[in-house]
Image: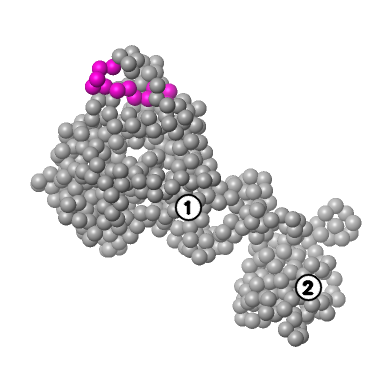
């Protein structure tokens, strides 16, 4: 079956190889994750100068920290001398410097080479020139975003623009003051599926009535399969009997003060390509970041963000966490169920998208353009 | 006496390294005192002027042994031997150092180089 023979209702997906070929994944690492803005860590995790996190961005390990002036810095986690990995832990804290454990080349929090054995005998070794190689950073929505490209694309166009494309303007998301919210819960999912299956899943709601009974109860219009990210500026309305965005529809937490009346009792979902999903509801924000680590494995770090006083006072957020935790597990189970099929000879040319999924075709076109292979 | 630099050019909390043989560094502490010691850690060839100055101590930037600027004594391994201390005076706004006559304690590789071996 070829795409040209498909009935009008259907369009083709990417071929199976796109989801299982390590060579294609390597191209995606290079041309997508190592080129675009990548949402790396929550700013509040970097509590003070010297606090750091290491993250895998594409095929690179990146060290993210705060300098003495509290500004965020990101560097390739690679010693300039012989290439040893500076820090292997996921997070930690240094007092004043990053020191390579191999030959003790020592870099300050700005990345400058401040000391090394025999360094004074090598006055021609520039301390900035041989400092850690830095990576572009931006802070937005309370997260540190990094870009490994030598000439990073416009953050406003690529990142803010995605949110504007979904919500219709840049102000709507500011109402939720995401940077000012506190992390009430973080769950990390280790998903045995290609990152694109997870994005595609998040983009459509054709599956909602089948695998998300709790979500469909809270957002009845999801049962028609069209909602999710189809209409610009549209947020799915809570059911009439629903009090809050919780697993049983019971009352939620304190409403975020900036949320407008027309945003109240509604759910908005945003995909910021290539690896961020944001869900907005009146009393909290669910913020997903994907870290694709292999062609068939993706780590998803998900934060539930509430007003700081909700988190500090120890209010019970479990029913609101449980709703989307269940949704996530239902979704990721579906993605893991799909991953083996990508290698079936039956799926070599891929599958099909129904009309309520046709907008996923634009995502596929985008992937192909990034890899330099226009859709045939 | 060896002129180091103008006092006005050495802010508190900083060090100035003299390219003598062996090199010497002058430290201006946060409390405003001046001290001069041998610049090279006695454990491995590292410049103490690049180290971390706290109170009257400087911590080697490589392996964290701390030297007392007043006595040259080291607090803990890996360095085991003290550095020499040198007299400091300020004359007409210029920091001057009078080198110690004692024998230095250079680290092994520097000692080998001074003795003509590989270094």
**Neighbour class for label 2 at 10 Å: few (<14), some, many (≥20)?**
many
Picture quadrant of residue A19: top left
Numbered circle sitting on residue B84: 2
Q: Secondary structure at mark 2?
A: loop
**Neighbour class for label 1 at 10 Å: few (<14), some, many (≥20)?**
many
Question: Residue at horizontal 70%, vertical 67%?
Answer: B49
Question: Residue at horizontal 44%, vertical 61%?
Answer: A47
| Residue B65 image offset from top left, x and y in percent | 67, 65
Colour setting: one colour
Mark 1 belongs to which subunit? Answer: A
Quadrant of the drawing holding the N terminus of chain B: bottom right
- Same-chain status of marks 2 and 1: no
| Residue A235 image offset from top left, x and y in percent | 21, 45
Viewer-closest of A11 and A266 = A11
Numbered circle sitting on residue A137: 1
Quadrant of the drawing holding the C terminus of chain B: bottom right
- Number of marks drawn: 2
């Amino acid at each position: 079956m070829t795409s040209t023979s498909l009935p009008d209702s259907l369009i083709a997906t990417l071929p199976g190889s796109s989801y299982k070929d390590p060579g294609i994944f390597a191209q995606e690492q290079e041309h997508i994750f190592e080129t675009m803005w990548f949402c790396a860590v929550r700013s509040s995790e970097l509590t003070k100068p010297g606090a750091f996190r290491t993250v895998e961005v594409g095929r690179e390990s990146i060290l993210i920290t705060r300098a003495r002036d509290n500004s965020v810095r990101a560097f390739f986690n690679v010693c300039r001398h012989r290439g040893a990995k500076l820090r292997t832990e996921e997070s930690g804290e240094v007092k004043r410097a990053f020191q390579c454990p191999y030959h003790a080349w020592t870099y300050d929090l700005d990345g400058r080479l401040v000391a090394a054995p025999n360094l004074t005998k090598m006055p021609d070794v520039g301390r900035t020139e041989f400092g850690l190689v830095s990576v572009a950073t931006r802070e937005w929505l309370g997260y540190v975003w990094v870009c490994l490209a030598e000439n990073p694309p416009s953050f406003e166009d690529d990142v803010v623009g995605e949110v504007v494309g979904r919500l219709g303007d840049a102000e709507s998301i500011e109402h939720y003051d995401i940077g000012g919210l506190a992390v009430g819960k973080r769950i990390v999912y280790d998903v045995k599926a290609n990152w694109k299956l997870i994005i595609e899943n998040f983009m459509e709601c054709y599956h909602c009535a089948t695998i998300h009974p709790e979500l469909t109860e809270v957002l009845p219009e999801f049962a028609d399969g069209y909602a999710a990210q189809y209409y610009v500026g549209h947020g799915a309305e809570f059911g009439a009997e629903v009090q809050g965005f919780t697993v049983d529809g019971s009352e939620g937490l304190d409403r975020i003060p900036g949320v407008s009346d027309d945003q109240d009792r509604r759910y908005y979902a945003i995909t910021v390509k290539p690896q961020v999903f944001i869900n907005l509801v009146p009393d909290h924000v669910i913020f997903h970041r994907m870290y694709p680590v292999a062609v068939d494995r993706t780590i998803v770090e998900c934060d539930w963000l509430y007003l700081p006083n909700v988190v500090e006072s120890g209010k019970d957020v479990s029913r609101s966490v449980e709703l989307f935790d269940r949704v996530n597990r239902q979704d990721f189970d579906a993605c893991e169920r799909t991953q083996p099929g990508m290698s079936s000879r039956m799926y070599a040319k891929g599958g099909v998208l129904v009309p309520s999924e046709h907008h996923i075709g634009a995502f596929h076109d985008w992937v192909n353009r990034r890899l330099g292979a226009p859709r045939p | 006496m060896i002129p180091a630099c103008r006092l006005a050019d050495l802010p508190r909390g900083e060090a100035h390294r003299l390219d003598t043989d062996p090199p010497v560094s002058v430290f201006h502490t946060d409390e405003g005192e001046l001290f001069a010691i041998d610049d090279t850690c006695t454990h491995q060839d590292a410049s103490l002027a690049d180290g971390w100055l706290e109170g009257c101590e400087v911590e080697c930037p490589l392996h964290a042994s701390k030297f007392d600027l007043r006595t040259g004594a080291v607090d803990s391994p890996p360095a085991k031997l003290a550095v020499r201390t040198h007299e400091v005076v300020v004359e007409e706004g210029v920091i001057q150092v009078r080198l110690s006559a004692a024998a230095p304690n250079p680290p092994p590789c520097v000692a080998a180089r001074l003795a003509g071996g590989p270094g």
